[in-house]
Image (cartoon, rainbow, N blue to C red):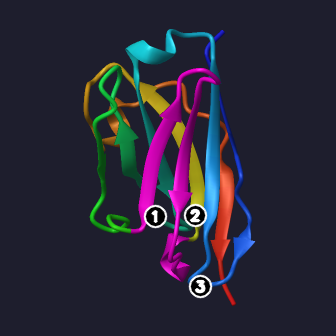
Amino acid sequence: QVQLVESGGDLVQPGGSLRLSCRTSGFSFDDYTVGWLRQAPGKGREGISYISRRHDDSDYADSVKGRFTIYRDSATRTVYLQMNSLKPEDTAIYYCAKTHYYSSLNPGDYKSWGQGTQVTVSS
């Protein structure tokens, strides 16, 4: 059974940092690209970062570029999202999901979404 389980969301002040984790199971970890996506209140889902299968290429949405870093640990089958310099507009539910595409920030390309973890940036 394919599972992706997010954790690490929290309430943080503007300018703060969080690290989100996505633990995976049930599929060949090195054969899929894993992405982080988010949904803010009243908005659609937004792809914010991915890390590609096998070669670990990555990319970011302009809204988070320079502030967020994605990386993966094949030994623990976990994908992380380090989020720095957080802004109130980063408030959202954050999801991880997998895709067979090598590179994509399109939420429609992702399958097997986790349940999400809430990130709230507020003073």
**Image position, residue 121 (x, y; %):** 63, 77
In the image, is residue 47 above or below residue 78? below
Q: Earlier in the sequence, mark 3 or mark 1?
A: 3
Taking depth in this image into account, of 54 and 99 the one nearest to the observer is: 54
User: Label 2 sits on what residue type?
Assistant: Ala
Taking depth in this image into account, of 47 and 53 the one nearest to the observer is: 53
| SS state under label 1 | loop
The image's mark for residue 25 is none
Taking the image as shown, residue 29 lies to the left or right of residue 75, namely left
**Image position, residue 35 (x, y; %):** 43, 38
Taking the image as shown, residue 83 lies to the left or right of residue 109, namely right
Q: Would you call the spot at circle 3 few (<14 residues within 10 Å), some (14-19), or many (20 or more)?
A: some
User: Label 3 sits on what residue type?
Assistant: Pro
Q: Residue shown at 58%/70% (left/top)?
A: 91
Region rendered in magenta: 67-90
In the image, is residue 26 above or below residue 10? above
Q: Which residue is mark 3?
A: 14
Task: State how many labels appear.
Answer: 3
Tell me the CA gap for discs 2 and 1. Answer: 9 Å
Q: Which image quadrant is residue 6 in?
A: top right
Q: Which residue is mark 2?
A: 92
Q: Which residue is mark 1?
A: 43
**Image position, residue 62 (x, y; %):** 27, 65
Taking depth in this image into account, of 99 and 60 the one nearest to the observer is: 60
Q: Residue shown at 54%/56% (left/top)?
A: 82
Quadrant into which the C terminus falls: bottom right
Marks 3, 1: nearer the viewer:
3
